[in-house]
Image: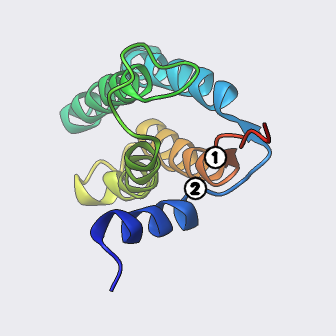
């Protein structure tokens, strides 16, 4: 029976696809998205307190994850890429569901923003080349 590290490695390999988006671009998109989520309540005039709070919290989370992940745009390199990718998938689902869970789906601007950016976040995550190139030396 394989040990836990071997099982984790296989799971990580399946989760980390080889998409066309380089990790550097993924990281830059995340920094921009984090700032956009923080600014969105003020740019688009959100009225609902939950929409404002969640947007700002998501923006901070995205910035922290981008800065703390091991990779070309990370600053402190403490979060493994597999964890980052798993959080990205969970965050995309959360963004799409948030207007309905927190009942701000009657307010058009934050509902559209959360759903559209949730779908975009999911597509960017699916399309990112998370695997490091293997050296042939």
Image coords of residue 107 (percent x, y): 38, 43
Left or right of residue 18, residue 58 in this image: left
Q: Residue at x 44, y 49 (%)?
A: 82
Q: Is mark 2 on a helix, strand or loop?
A: loop
Secondary structure at numbered mark 1: loop
- First in sequence: mark 1 vs mark 2: 2
Residue 115 percent location from the top left of the image: 50, 50
Is residue 54 positioned above or below 105 on the image? above
Q: Nearer the viewer, residue 96 or 89?
A: 89
CA distance separating discs 1 and 2: 6 Å
Tell which residue pokes out farthest to the bottom in this image.
1
| Image height of 15 relative to 82, above or below | below
Q: Is residue 130 above or below residue 79?
A: below
Depth check: 136 or 8 in front? 136
Percent across and percent down for residue 30 are 53, 27
Residue under the point 25% across and 54% down: 103
Identify the residue at the far front of this view.
Answer: 137
Point out residue 77 in the picture as x, y percentages from the top left corner. Answer: 39, 23
| Quadrant in the picture for the N terminus | bottom left
**Disc 1 target residue:** 131
- Mark 1, Cα crowd under 10 Å, few <14 / some 14-19 / many 20+, is some
- Asked if the residues shown at circle 1 and circle 2 are in contact, with their CB atoms under 8 angstroms apart, the answer is yes
- Quarter of the image where one finds residue 89: bottom left
Residue in the foreground of this view, choosing between 41 and 55: 55
Q: Which quadrant would residue 27 be assigned to in this image?
A: top right
Q: Which residue is under mark 2?
A: 16
Residue 16 shown left or right of residue 37 in the figure: right
């Amino acid at each position: 029976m394989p040990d836990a590290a071997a099982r984790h490695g296989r799971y990580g390999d399946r989760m980390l696809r080889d998409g066309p988006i380089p990790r550097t671009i993924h990281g830059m998109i995340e920094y921009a998205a984090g700032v956009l989520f923080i600014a969105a309540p003020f740019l688009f005039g959100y009225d609902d307190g939950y929409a404002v709070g969640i947007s700002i919290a998501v923006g901070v989370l995205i910035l922290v994850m981008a800065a703390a992940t091991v990779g070309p745009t990370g600053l402190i390199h403490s979060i493994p890429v597999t964890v980052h990718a798993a959080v990205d998938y969970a965050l995309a689902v959360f963004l799409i569901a948030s207007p309905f869970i927190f009942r701000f789906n009657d307010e058009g601007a934050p509902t559209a923003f959360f759903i559209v950016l949730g779908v975009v976040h999911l597509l960017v995550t699916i399309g990112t080349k998370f695997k490091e190139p293997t050296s042939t030396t």
